[in-house]
Image (cartoon, coloured by chain):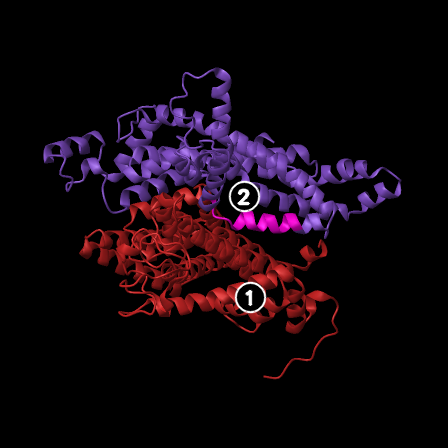
Chain colours: A purple, B red
Amino acid sequence: MTEFLIRSLRRKLFTLFLVTVVSFLIIHLAPGEPAQVDPLNPKFTPEMVERFRRAFHLDRPLPVQYVLFYRDLFTGRSVSWKDNQPVLEKIGERFLNSLPLFAVGTLLTWTLAFPLGIHAAVRRGGFFDRGTAFFAYVLISLPGFFFAYLLILLVVNTLAVPVLGMQTYGFENAPALHRLNDRLWHLLLPALLGSATGIAVLSRYVRSQMLEVIHQDYVRTARAKGLPEETVLYKHALRNALLPFLTMFGLILPGLVGGSVIIESIFSWPGLGRMAYEAILARDYPVILTLNFIAAVLVLLGTLLSDLLYAAADPRIRLA
Amino acid sequence: MTAPPTLPETDGAARGRAGLWRAFRRNRPALAGLVFFCAFLVLAVIGAWATAGRQPLLDPARVRLEERLRPPLSRARDGASPPLLGIYLLGTDELGRDLFARMLEGAWVSLTVGFIAVGISVAVGILAGGIAGYYGRRPIRLRHAAAAGALAAGAILGWTGHLLPGLLLLGASLLGCLRMRRRRRSAPIGLLDRPLIDVDAFVMRIVDILLCFPSFFLILTVVALLPPSMVTIMAVIGLTSWEGTARFVRAEFLSLREREFVEAARALGVGDPGILFRHMLPNALGPVLVSATLGVASAILTESGLSFLGFGVPPPHATWGNILADGRRFLFDAPWLTLAPGVAILLVVLAFNLFGEGLRDLVNPQAREGR
């Protein structure tokens, strides 16, 4: 076990190192320069450009830049090129905004997908099964931004509720209850959109897992013993069907960073995804690279977590 | 070619082509997907023909300022240069351009992007997965790495303008590669023969690295940094989405490698490329086809998402994504500018998804059992 942990961590650290190298190379070898050091930018004199270049270490050779950048990142000294704010602070602030969106979205996904999938599996081939199957395909095929505008049209036209941003402008001093209500309305649509594809994919997966398990011998045995259908389904079948979802649980972590670029920019939600979009637009290298680094860490942590969960839940699997 | 004598059929998996088609036809959503896909193909080709050229039948770029934001099916006013039949089938946009013509042009763009991106990703995936699965445990030795490194360094030097040293290095490393091939087992130089990592682990390591980047974020970054063009977008989508194909081609090849027919081919003296591509690949093609079909759907979605954010195919071309992105400013006044491209994307992607799932059921009979 410890041996597995050590080996796996070593491997993942090496992968992480390669990821940092690759992302650094992608950013720096791409043609074009950030606005502050672009010699064609009319707002800056050559002296200012020179000063910026020195401040950003852009006058050093690439390997030195690499070392300096990650040294600054780990010591918390790297600052955004756009507004000179410390990168980690900026990201922390945005992270707190993204968190409720992510949490509510994930909650919606997992609480809705399971009942839908199980019900479809039990009523296999029936109206409900076909209906959810078709609906799931539509949700998977629907471009998120288009769905967003459909919902906005619907909500704004019929319910007259403002939904852009995190709260309605000028509501800062409203009574607490009103403010909460307002925040919830603003949260609901983007969270629903963020979870739509997840619900569709996950419910299909739950259904196929359930179907696989329902045909097993032990389920037939349980039925033959005369156990009530509820017990057979939820105790004997479902528990065994749950296993693969443990792995998926680890894999939702990275969605925190890259999952919501489009949704957040439509709803003007000041979260991590929108921050990434703005940073890319402004060629704010420190922010892009830091977000990328965090995303990679989350991916690697997620896979480790799912390996461990799997081993904990399934005694047949031994980590070696 | 004469048909080989048929073996007694055991179950559905061994049925001939006609049987497969019959099984496919029973899956009505998949059939609908296929029919719609064919219709879309015809429409896109006609659209590309009708909107191209100097005097196109339907001009997607003609600006008629007096005909701004006309609703669908409205007649052209007198004096304006009318569209085909004098009717704006899908209305006009904020510059009075015929939405129908723009949608047709966009259909061709979506189709090209989808297919070429998936072509790239499938090619890379098959190559990487095939090499990993076939060579598996064979080690990459230090001399291989050195040659590859020198090759890459030469290419980078040449690329960044140091033409002479770059070319010299390239030539030297190529020469080294050739020599390495020729005297394969003659004189192993101790250090250079040190094994570094086996081929399989190497390819899978690359896949691991790729998986560490959130895919849409990576695509967005690269597309935003490179100069905008359709080629860039297709290449970037293709080169960032091959890991799935690589994974299951590898798994398939790992098991195919041990089969008798591969052994027979090897005994007959067929070379490695011949075994890989002529004998093993056709047996692994089913799942590749399925993931390619589903891949086209997701490539079209990705492209429209990029266009929507303003990083897509650059302006003279109309794409469904940028029609929608431009139309959102008129969401409440001219909803057809949002609805038409949105519904079109939905239908095409849905068709590809349904068709792909139908194919998956055919290729993978175990999954069919559950239906």
In the rendered image, which residue does mark 1 sit on? B35
**Mark 1: secondary structure:** helix
The tag on residue A23 is: none
- Name the front one of labels 2 and 1: 1
Q: Amino acid at mark 1?
A: Val
Q: Nearer the viewer, residue B209 or B68?
A: B68
Count of marks placed on residues: 2
B277 horizontally vs A309: left or right: left
Q: Nearer the viewer, residue A210 or B166?
A: A210
Q: Is residue B208 above or below residue A275?
A: below
Q: Nearer the viewer, residue B48 or B4?
A: B48
Predominant secondary structure, magenta span: helix
Q: Nearer the viewer, residue A253 or A110?
A: A110
Chain part drawn in magenta: A131-144
For image coordinates 53% across by 63% down, the residue present is B36
In magenta stretch: residue B82: no
**Mark 2: secondary structure:** helix
Within 10 angstroms of label 1, few (less than 14), some, or many (20 or more) residues?
some
Q: Position of residue B340 (x, y in %)?
A: 44, 54
Chain of the residue under the numbered disc 1 shown in the image: B
For the question of whether residue A10 can be seen, the reply is no
In magenta stretch: residue A137: yes
For image coordinates 45% across by 57% down, the residue present is B121
The tag on residue A197 is: 2
For image coordinates 74% across by 66% down, the residue present is B11
